[in-house]
Amino acid sequence: MPPSELAEAWIRFLTDVDAALPEAIELHCLGGFAAAAHYGLPRPTADIDYVHVAPPAARERLQEIAGEGSPLARKHGLYFQHVALVSLPDRYDERLREIFPGRFRNLRLQGLDPHDLALSKLSRNASVDREDVQFLARSVPLDPTVLRRRYEEELRPIILGSQEEHDQTLRMWLEAYF
């Protein structure tokens, strides 16, 4: 599906989700959806990954309305997915950017800053994550100094797993993409 058609499909899905929500909620989005919606990543994705929802009690209701297997997910072929384990820079929430600002009554989607989005892919480092980081590095473009500083100051002290492994992955990314 071309990016313009995918964006239209997301708008239709999100409009239906917004209409079904009984209250206002805010989501912190990441993954392919945030990369595509904010930065033009051409890779299609059917899920809208989010790491945080406010108010917290709305998470269960959102999953009922628009999670995988829900009626809206079956209708649109898109769904929301809560990501429980992800390593994010300590102050990522200070740099969020609204996706589709002012478009919905109850649904407020916040996307990660491009450097934070790249760093969110560091732990998994799958081929699709490396492709996404390469895309962000070239298209945004990412600033390697900002990426390294955020990693060292905000992510490395709290990262899940081996710091040395993550250090090596970041070095590889910096050499390959900048």
Image: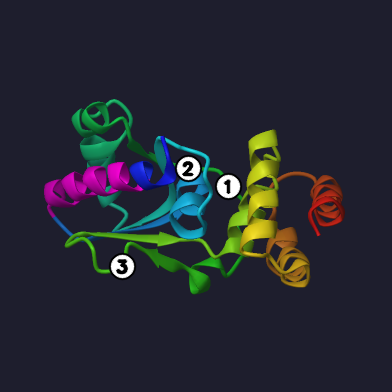
Reply yes or no: does residue 131 show up in magenta: no
- Mark 3–mark 2 contact, CB under 8 Å? no
- Mark 2–mark 1 contact, CB under 8 Å? yes
Horizontal and vertical percent for residue 102? Answer: 25, 69
Magenta part of the chain? 7-22
> SS at mark 1?
loop
What residue lies at 21% left-to-right and 60% top-to-bottom?
104
> Mark 3 or mark 2, which is nearer to you?
3
Residue 158, above or below 1: below
Residue 99, above or below 162: below
Q: Nearer the viewer, residue 56 or 32?
A: 32
N-term mark: 1 or 3: 1
Q: CA distance from mark 3 to mark 2?
A: 23 Å
Q: Nearer the viewer, residue 24 or 84?
A: 24
Horizontal and vertical percent for residue 153? Answer: 74, 70
Residue 100, above or below 47: below
Q: Looking at the magenta stretch, what is its main secondary structure?
A: helix
At label 1, the amino acid type is: Val
Q: Which residue is mark 2?
A: 83
Reply yes or no: does residue 19 show up in magenta: yes
At label 2, the amino acid type is: Val
Q: Which residue is mark 1?
A: 86
Q: Quadrant of residue 114?
A: bottom right
Q: Which residue is mark 3?
A: 101
Assess disc 1: are there few (<14), some (14-19) or many (≥20) residues with their C-alpha within 10 Å of its C-alpha.
Answer: some
Horizontal and vertical percent for residue 117? Answer: 58, 56
Residue 104, above or below 143: above
Q: Nearer the viewer, residue 47 or 60?
A: 47
Is residue 89 visible in this depiction of the protein? no
What residue lies at 54% left-to-right and 65% top-to-bottom?
113
> Mark 1 or mark 3, which is nearer to you?
3
Q: Is residue 31 left or right of residue 103?
A: right
